[in-house]
Amino acid sequence: MISNLSLDLYKKIYLIRKAEELIIKYYPEDEMKTPMHMSMGQEAVAVAVCHALGQEGQIFGFYRSHAVFLAKTEDPERFFGELYGKVTGPVHGKGGSMHLADPKAGLMCASAVVASSIPLAVGAAFANKQKQNGAICCAYFGDGAIEEGVFWESLNVACVMRLPVLFVCEDNGLAVHSKPEVRRGFKRIMEIVRHFECGVFEDNSTDVEVLYERTVEAIEAAKLHARPSFLHLQCYRYLGHIGIAEDFGVGYRSKAEYEEWFKRDPLALQRKRLLGNGWTEAGLGEEERRIDAQLENSVRKAQAAPFPSPEELYTGVFHEAH
């Protein structure tokens, strides 16, 4: 029998992959007025983490936010509304691709400034501890954020105060175009973090179910020992740092490297698992076509939706009493 978990994880990866394929299709029309930091190849990390956190988990993300938004909300209509700068977006067209957020769904924020959402997650974790509500916060960041001082300050204070926070490094081995060996004076982040008072977990799998189990372990350890967990997950982005195209001609990485990672494509792996455990091509194709139709409809709605009024510029700047 196929578990609901296997299908749910696959549908989320498929939703993210196909949403970004539509971005590639429509972006040249120049109606999406936002830079794009694509998640292709990395979807399994976001899906595993968001699914393990559940509805109550709070996630603080960064500029490569497509995958975490769709994994947490499963709402492509508002996703495309934001990319098109329309009032139907989750932040009414003012945030674009790099500032997707939906606090009601647990995606508290995403920030274009590297590492800037990490201390926010620690602050929220402190609030949760004071409230004794059992909620888990997740600071979700790329490996480039590790070189920022605020990462170390946040990790240190979270350990000292024994805060219920999950530090998740989505490590694609690149800070824009720079590999670790040219920007770090240390070899492995895990060897350093193990000296902190926190749980330490790592994985280089592209199998979403493996990553889901690893995330569950990290969350359970944080709850059991009343301290942070650090989760280091390796992945590979298929497209350039920014934009909708490949960047192998630039010279800082090779197509052969991509081809090796693509053999372990997270979407293909999970699809193969489903087909090997009872699903037929026809049955799975029906699920995929349902998502495809939902996505196309979401794009059409976003294209037709109105832009925000000029007055919208003055909302959400300060706290507004209701």
Image (cartoon, rainbow, N blue to C red):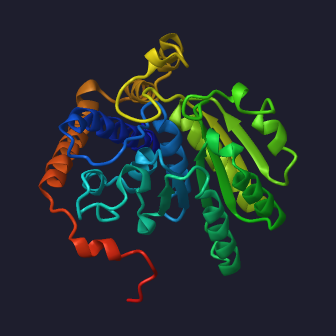
Observer-nearest residue: 48 or 153? 153
Please say if 291 is above or below 270. Answer: below
Classify residue 192 as left or right of residue 175: right
- Quadrant in the picture for residue 161: bottom right
Q: Residue at x 78, y 50 (%)?
A: 199
Q: Residue furthest right?
A: 195
Observer-nearest residue: 72 or 144? 144
Observer-nearest residue: 249 or 261? 249
Which x, y percent locates residue 50? 51, 51
Which x, y percent locates residue 99? 43, 56
Q: Residue at x 48, y 13 (%)?
A: 255
Q: Quick one: quadrant of the N terminus?
A: top left
Q: Quick one: quadrant of the C terminus?
A: bottom left
Q: Is residue 24 visible?
A: yes
Please say if 273 is above or below 217. Answer: above
Which x, y percent locates residue 6? 45, 39
- Quadrant in the picture for residue 169: top right
Please say if 19 is above or below 269. Answer: below
Which x, y percent locates residue 282? 23, 28
- Quadrant in the picture for residue 40: top left
